[in-house]
Amino acid sequence: MKKLTRILACCILSSTLLTPPVIMAHPPIKKAENTSALLQSLAKQINLPWQSFTLPNGLRVLVHTDHKAPVVGVSVWYHVGSKDEPKGKTGFAHLFEHLMFEGSQNIQGSFWKPLRETGATDSNGTTNFDRTNYYETVPTSALDRVLYMESDRMGYLLQGMTQEKLDNQRAVVQNEKRQKDNRPYSAVGYAITQALVPEGHPYHHDTIGSMEDLDAASLDTVKDWFRENYGPNNAVLVLAGDIDIDKAKTMVNHYFGAILRGRDIVHPETPIWTLPTRKDEVITDKVALSKIYRAWSIPSYNNPDSIPLDLSAAVLGGLASSRLDQILVHQEQLAVNVSATTQSFEGQGRFLVSVTVKAGVNPQYVSQRLDKILAEYLEKGATQDEVNRAAMDVLSESVAESVSAQGPILAQGLLYAKDPDYYKKALYAVATSTAEAVQKSTQKWLSRPVYALTVLPGERQAYQESQSGKSTPKTDNNLILPAAPQPAAAEIASPREALPAVGKVPDVRFPTITHSQLKNGIAVSYAQRPAVPLTTVLISFDGGITADTALPGTESLMLSMLTEGTKEKDVIELSKEKERLGAVISFGAGDDYSSMTFLSPSVTFRQTTGLASEMLFGSTFPEKELARLKASTLANMAASRQSPAWLATRALRQNLYGEGHPYRHLVTEENIQKITRQNLLDFRQKWIRPYKAHIFIVSDQSLDQILPVLNNVFGHWQIPNDAGELKPTSTAKAGHLSDILLINRPQSPQSVIMAASVLPLKEKEDQDTLFNLDVANSILGGNFLSRLNMDLRQNKGWSYGVGSQINARTLSSEFSLAAPVQTNQTAASINAIQEDINHFLTDKGITDAELRETVSGIINRTPAAYEKSSNILGGMVDLALMNRPDNYYDTLNQRYRALTPSELDKTARQWLSSQALSWVVVGDANLVKPQLEKRGLSVEQVESDKIK
């Protein structure tokens, strides 16, 4: 079973990530006595009651009522995906996902603008083999508007569709494909899709389609595709949150009732195909490490074998303690990482295994070793303990806290299994699975011939580009189109009322924070979330990358080693214990702080706390595991060098910050090789200590229940009077003389443009200025409707997405932007970005409408933001680290409403400048450099393997 939703195990905050502390005894961990009963109890706690009705036109509606926050999650699921596309129309379902955001008869222009005014969160659309969905979470008072919009694109879309919109979104989709294909190992997905089923099978082609078919899409064929597939009788509407069934019936009937029923859809047959014999294939790509894959077709979403196969994948290569991890990564150290997973579709699924081969190891030998391990696993099967750990992993990550997650669970059950309660059956099957059942299903499906793929370092295959012209086609806005055929599906010509206004959204207060402390004085901040039976604890410390300047990479490696073995348990036993508890225990570092986070079902919180403390205080840093982690780190660095985004970011950091600056923080291969066990022990002694420590808790349990557990483990930890070491404060700047640094990456399907400048603004001392600058940047490049994105994506069609951000930091801040673009429009894109920024800072400042819409969207997002425990935890951490009062978030709406365009213009013009930007481009220099030089730009070219 696919995990219903993933609970975040860590919070990425403005100043901190995750990390740990030092060394003392802790109480022994008591194992759960009745695993089966615990698993079944957890499964029963996940409950999403629903009601339903169906309109006369066939639209099925599900309503899940949850009044914990004044928001409603809205999602529309069209039962059409890429498997329904005939030959010559591949990519049409995904293309339509884009087109249906581009306006309709009664909504002129992009849907994103009226959506932003609602404060919509979790808003987007997706397409896969089987369905296309659109979703958004909005304040309850904005529900009228959203239902109007969803019904307008269902019933009134074609009247607003033009050749210009089609040409633009075709270009956007093709840039999305280029962006995907520009990544290492991008050919793997295409190879597996084509190998597992024969040509002509509905699952034989990828969802994004081919460049050739996208080029050939005409306005008439696209309109016909809509008429055939997007009727209300081929859709499910889900409303989850602050709404009841009676109100839902009234509203849905009002907005969707007049839409005509479409034709009845007959989906193609999708038989599970078995390869006649094993198929071995080798391809080359610009990658640093060889990678080995095994793939089989397996049964669909609701087949009885689906759950056992999911658990089998976890045992084989999904859990941290999996068979492949134990053998190939830890014992024999032949691999950097491994995985095994399933993909579930409506008609069938896939079982996938992958192994990333360690540098210097013969991939052919690893391939043979993998086959032997798989054969032994098929013969002997999983143990019951392994199955139970896999089940606990699924159940602990299947809690749907937000309404944006609850609705899709019900929709998929109805769409694929004709039962919104399918998730209950699936969770019960997970909780009661046996080793015998898992082995039986595994033997049945994985004993069939396998597709065996190996990816070796080498040259990439020639890229299939669009042949219709590599720049956005220009169209005649006065073009007279042929009359549309008579409605055959969801299409109406009758007039409608105007787009509803967004009702008043009440200011929602941040949840109450209770402050306390442990008996040793460590500060505690707590917020209760009774709806979800989970407890999350984050402990922040002084530290971060600003403390890691002597030998950069030491802190990261030290934090990783905290999970690699203690006095009582080796790394595998630690992983097994976490899995038995359904726990996640993580360590990490941000700029200025380090943290440790542990999360588990509340029923196992006491044992999880004990295990977390064992890692924190009792880690022994075994030399064997350190050698393995260093090798893994070096391998990952080599792999990262094939990523254009990594190369650009790495180069920018060196352009912005001089030697010795804490934010330069270049972790090099040489550094990793130099780091010793003693370096790690010394760093832990200096920085993993309770100086400035603060504990943050979000739980359904009361603070009175939690404090004794934490006191028992952390209450005896003696707090020092000062930091372990002073942090460096160098602000050395780097000087880059050329206009553009061009990193040559031959055969890149697109160019990646990045630019940044250092702002002499400190996140604490200059909070007001950074607050204003952040809002101004939202209009320039901080959201989908920003000027930069609307220009390069929506107007020109040169990119899948362009954005900029303000990164507030302790010593200084940054303004940065990123733009993956068509290769042949690289120089033109840089020119367009510079022009957009210059206009923004001079003659085309922020308008009243832009500010009003931006502020409205920010304020109206607040109710949904406070719905999630992870956001509450992150908010509490931010308050403490920034020395802000508890009511800070409650004052923000008033501050946003008081902003003026002139105030933001003044701030932006003072601190932002296109001339101050340092530019980096990663792409094929043979194609890009002539463009740049033609525009008079000075270019410094460097090969990708020369980037430090």
Image: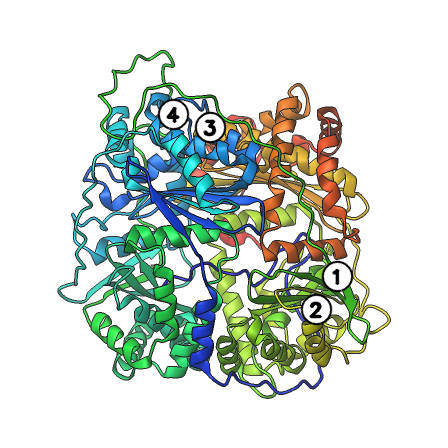
Determine whether 870 is above or below 77 in the image: below
The three-letter code of the residue at mark 3 reads: Ser
Secondary structure under the numbered disc 2 in the rendered image: helix
The three-letter code of the residue at mark 4 reads: Lys
Q: Earlier in the sequence, mark 4 or mark 3?
A: 3
Secondary structure under the numbered disc 1 in the rendered image: strand
Of residues 936 and 93, which is closer to you in this image?
93
Q: CA distance from mark 3 to mark 2?
A: 47 Å
Image depth: mark 2 or mark 4 in front: 2
Residue on which the image places disc 2: 703
Residue pictured at 56% horizontal, 76% vertical: 604
Residue on which the image places disc 3: 110
The three-letter code of the residue at mark 1 reads: Thr
Residue 876 percent coordinates (x, y): 70, 56
Secondary structure under the numbered disc 4 in the rendered image: helix
Residue pictured at 49% horizontal, 68% vertical: 396
Residue 590 percent coordinates (x, y): 66, 58
Q: Earlier in the sequence, mark 3 or mark 2?
A: 3
Q: Earlier in the sequence, mark 1 or mark 4?
A: 4
Secondary structure under the numbered disc 3 in the rendered image: loop
Dot 1 surroundings within 10 Å: few (below 14), some, or many (20 or more)? few
Dot 4 surroundings within 10 Å: few (below 14), some, or many (20 or more)? many
Residue pictured at 69% horizontal, 86% vertical: 25
Image depth: mark 4 or mark 3 in front: 3
425 left or right of 45 in image:
left
Q: Are marks 3 and 1 in contact (CB under 8 Å)?
A: no
Q: Are marks 1 and 4 in contact (CB under 8 Å)?
A: no
